[in-house]
């Protein structure tokens, strides 16, 4: 099979998956952050000045078959991208928000020099961030609560 034929089959398969998801009442929409989501992200940024986020999200949902209400499945923050890089430095960057639980998860990759992933829990009194990241010389895990490092371990 040639490379072109493989691409045609891949596109056809993706189209069929999209059509099947639509038939099952699944969908996605691009919307601005809700005020409550923005407030959650701003609380994190107040504790961690290096924290960055976009102002739009992709909302993945399923439509209830009888009530037609949208049931949220995932909220993914869409970071700004310029010249092929997110925030001007990352090859890839993903962030999801689960606002009811106050949970934000993220992963980033700037190549072998810097990549990692983390989880941030926001409660009424605390912002707790746990991050695992690697650079050119090694890896580290860090736990920060309200801007203060609680624990850090390097490999």
Image (cartoon, rainbow, N blue to C red):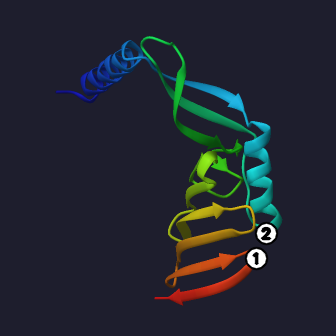
Position above or below: 70 against 45: above
Residue 5: x %, y % from top left: 25, 22
- Residue 148: image quadrant is bottom right
On the question of residue 98 being in view, the answer is: no
The residue lying at 50 percent from left, 13 percent from top is 67
Q: Name the residue tied to disc 1.
A: 147
On the question of residue 139 being in view, the answer is: yes
Position above or below: 115 against 77: below
State the residue in front, 128 or 124.
Answer: 124
Q: Do labels 1 and 2 touch, CB within 8 Å?
A: yes
Q: Name the residue tied to disc 2.
A: 47
The residue lying at 27 percent from left, 30 percent from top is 3
Image-based side of 127 in relation to 151, left or right: right
Residue 57 numbered mark, or none: none
Query: Quarter of the image containing the N terminus?
Result: top left
- Helix, strand or loop at mark 1: loop
- Helix, strand or loop at mark 2: helix
Residue 68: x %, y % from top left: 51, 13
The residue lying at 63 percent from left, 70 percent from top is 129
Q: Circle 2: is it few (<14), some (14-19), or many (20+) Cα within 10 Å?
A: some
- Residue 110: image quadrant is bottom right
Image-based side of 91 in relation to 56, left or right: left
Residue 136: x %, y % from top left: 52, 79
Position above or below: 5 against 99: above
Residue 135: x %, y % from top left: 54, 77
State the residue in front, 110 or 53.
Answer: 53
Q: Which of marks 1 and 2 is nearer the N terminus?
A: 2
Q: Distance between the residues labelled 1 and 2?
A: 5 Å
State the residue in front, 151 or 16.
Answer: 151
Position above or below: 140 against 14: below
């Amino acid at each position: 099979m040639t490379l072109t034929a493989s691409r045609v089959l891949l596109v056809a398969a993706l189209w069929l998956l999209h059509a099947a998801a639509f038939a099952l009442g699944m969908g996605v929409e691009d919307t601005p952050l809700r005020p409550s989501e923005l407030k959650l992200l701003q609380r994190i940024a107040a504790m961690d000045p290096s924290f960055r986020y976009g102002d739009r999200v992709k909302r993945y949902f399923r439509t209830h078959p009888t009530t037609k209400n949208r049931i949220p499945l995932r909220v993914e923050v869409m970071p700004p991208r310029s010249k092929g890089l997110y925030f001007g430095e990352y090859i890839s960057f993903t962030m999801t928000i689960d606002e009811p639980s106050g949970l934000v998860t993220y992963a980033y990759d700037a190549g072998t020099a810097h990549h990692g992933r983390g989880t941030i829990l926001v409660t009424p009194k605390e912002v707790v961030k746990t991050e695992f990241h690697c650079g050119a010389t090694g890896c580290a895990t860090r736990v920060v609560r309200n801007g203060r490092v609680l624990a850090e371990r390097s490999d």
